[in-house]
Amino acid sequence: MASEAKKEEEAVCVTGANGFIGTWLVKTLLDNNYTSINATVFPGSDLSHLFALPGAGDANLRVFEADVLDSGAVSRAVEGCKGVFHVASPCTLEDPVDPEKELILPAVQGTLNVLEAAKRFGVRRVVVTSSISAIVPNPGWKGKVFDETSWTDLEYCKSRKAKAFLDRRTLGAQYLKKPKSKALKKWYPVSKTLAEKAAWEFAEKHGVDVVAIHPATCLGPLMQPYLNASCAVLQQLLQGSKDTQEYHWLGAVHVKDVAKAQVLLFESPAASGRYLCTNGIYQFGDFAERVSKLFPEFPVHRFDGETQPGLIPCKDAAKRLMDLGLVFTPVEDAVRETVESLKAKGFLGQHKEACRPILNPTMSSPAPCSRSWSISEDSLRRYVHFASESCIQELLSASDSNRFGNGDDGWKVLTLDDGVEISKRRSGSLHTFRSRWLLKSVSPQQFITVANAIDAAKQWDSDLVEAKYIKDLEDNLSIIRLRFGEHSKPLFRNREFIVYERRETMEDGTLVVAVASLPKEIAAGLHPKQNNSIRGLLLQSGWVVEKLEDDSCMVTYVVQLDPAGWVPKCFVNRLNTKLVMIIENLRKLAQACPTNKDT
């Protein structure tokens, strides 16, 4: 083991340092008195949680923005280091649009760039974070216990439509037709297998000391702000998923054990080759049974028969790591900690039904909030379902057609050179909105906000000109301008409304987008705020975006127009009474920050 003095003297590099495993690895290095850590992050990605780690600071944690495909940036991060932990490798929750570009190229060429830099600067050892995805799927392994001698069957992946790149050694430009969704689960194993094989070939040819670790499904508290793919397996299971994980499961492991193992492999001179990192091998159905017993309030599916055909269980599958001294955390503890973290970060409700708005109007109303708002169950609600990012991609990929197909109600997105055009057909009417700022990379929340805002505004004016962000008022508050034409409803005719939008995340993780709209002349202070002209001219609306168990979003749209009185009434989802307070605070803020600029 490395001495404490040596740890303080030696610099190490962690690629992909702000990911799920990468963050835990940085934490473990800091806990083990490593005082010089070069951390690479993808350019523009969030790294605030890295510096929130105990002991992290500018003196011991140097951040390098480096795409692993940028060999120069990788070299700058590796220079001066005695050890490299290569963790960075793309892993997406969504099907890749271009698997070669999104998964295979960064995994393979990124690994080679790291190893080339390690060779150039005389790095003592590179710990490559591979995956069980480089060990399975391997359907031909039946009858034997999976261990480090197993490799993912690329021919099997090829037979499941993951064909590109497998039959050639270089990254070609040709690309096949898009595989079907089920086949795309094979792309990640392909990328990890090819990357690891490239690493061993490079190591043998150039004499670089490489050790590879193969974590199973990693669980544990999320320190990063987003949901990672491995924890999503547990999340989806808790929400009723019936996915068996087929040939993609061996077992689970606490992410802190993975980080400890990575450091252990770097510090142990005798370590060599591949190391499986899992707290046992067992059926996914057995795992689901354990989860169900721990959390009976969740709708965990009970599987009949084998979920992994022919898989042989093994308690000490990670014997090589155990022989080096690694002690695994019980799987039950890993599950508990993950669930607590998922709840805290809003990725998981208390149970399945807690993720759904209450649709039954006969249910009792929620208790009034402290601001004496009137909350009624006779709410104007619209429900729009989106399959998260995948739905957006499907809309975009289908946007080369100017037709809606059979003419049924629905959405369409047409890609333009400078943005997108969003259209919605409903009850025979067609509403179209052209946006310069809403691009392909739009998030589901942004898309839902804009699409619903335009849809609602079109009800008042079929000739609505445009809605766009015109300036930022503060970090979490944006302004949109709606311009109504001469054919709009009398209240809005030939007027501009300034829309103040605010996004808030509730304690239960629910994202709320609240919007208050004021006529431009009032928002700009052209009328005294105490003037009765404000009466009847305050339009308030909001969107409650909630994630469902099938990884889609439920959007509750609320709108209120109160032409009779000073105090507006707001109808809200009974699970989210805080929305009314947000809107009220927003209205006050909007009136306190008038603007008469036409920018």
Image: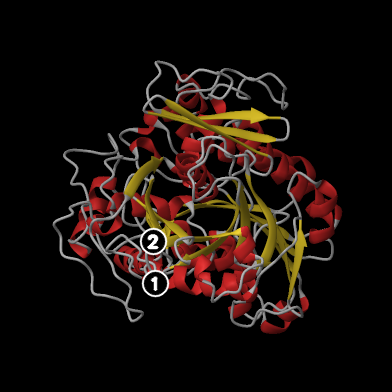
Tell me: residue 168, above or below residue 521: above
- When asked about the image quadrant of residue 413, the answer is top right
In what element is the residue under mark 2? loop
Residue type at the position of mark 1: Val
The front one of 284 and 431 is 431
- Is residue 91 placed above or below 503 in the rendered structure? above
Looking at the picture, how far across and down is residue 247, in whole percent? Answer: 37, 36
The structure residue drawn at horizontal position 20% and vertical position 66%, both measured from the top left corner, is 365
- Residue 187 or residue 275, whichever sits in front: 187
47 or 506: nearer the viewer: 506
Q: Quadrant of residue 472?
A: bottom right
Question: Residue 5 appears at what percent x and percent y?
Answer: 72, 84
- Tag 1's secondary structure? loop
Q: What residue sits right under mark 1 in the picture? A: 567
Residue 135 visible in rendering? no
Mark 2, residue position:
562
